[in-house]
Amino acid sequence: MKRAYRYIHRSEVIILNNLQWTKPIPVLNMFSSGGFWMANRMGINSVDDKVIRDFNVYGIIKYGLSLIFATSAFLVTYSYNIPPAIILAILVFYLVEVHFLFLFPLIIDKVKAPLWSSVKMTYSVGLISCLMNTMAIAQYMLFGLLEPHYPYKKWYTGCLAIIFWYQDEVRNRI
């Protein structure tokens, strides 16, 4: 989790100087708008229609699979009256989601087979390390939504942390 805090801190410094980056994204365009935001932070000022389509398609796949597996884990454990069903569901959500941790930056870099490439990169960095650091970043992001003045500041800080992680430790491996 040391990695998570290092990248969060690095991102906080930049986000605090660029609060205009922390505006809400429309829910109906969250994947394409979020992907475009990430592309801008990676120094790419325009993306083609295919990349925008990929943000939407792969975003639905990534979070759809994560939600399906998390819901299934919850329903199975809850039906057997296992008390920590919600905790297991959250863990399963992130265990699935972390496989696609670097998906959007890979799409931005126009890597072929971005789903498979993201899975390979996650295992290359280390599945457990990715899981623990991602959960730390996610916790930071989600609790940030409760802040009244800049509710999206920590969300975007977490997104930028993932970009830095990708640029520092993954991009040179593809």
Image (spheres, rainbow, N blue to C red):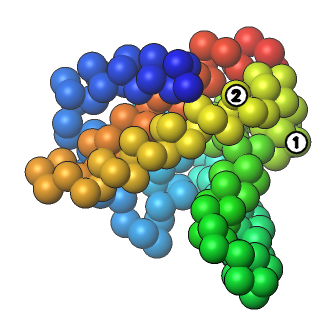
Q: Nearer the viewer, residue 14 or 146?
A: 146
Labelled disc at residue 38: none
Give the class, few, some or many, for how many residues have Cα within 10 Å of label 1's Cα (few <14, many ≥20). few
Residue type indicated by callout 1: Trp
Relative depth, front residue between 88 and 92: 88
Residue 171: x percent and y percent?
70, 19
**Left or right of 172, for residue 40:** left
Secondary structure type for disc 1: helix
Q: Which residue is mark 1?
A: 116
Q: Which residue appears at 42% of the width and 69% of the height?
A: 27
Q: In this rendering, does residue 53 appear at all?
A: no
Task: Give me the C-alpha separation between circle 2 and circle 1.
Answer: 19 Å
Question: 71 or 78, which is in the foreground?
Answer: 78
Q: Which residue is at 40% across, 53% downward?
A: 142
Q: Does residue 8 appear in this view?
A: yes
Q: Give the amino acid at mark 2.
A: Ser
- Quadrant in which the N terminus appears: top right
Cβ–Cβ under 8 Å for marks 2 and 1: no
What's the residue at 61%, 62% (across, down)? Answer: 87
Where 44 falls versus 114 (above or below)? above
- Residue 167 vertical position relative to residue 71 in the rendered view, above or below: above
Q: What residue sits right under mark 2 in the picture? A: 129
Residue 145, position as x, y percentages in the image: 30, 55
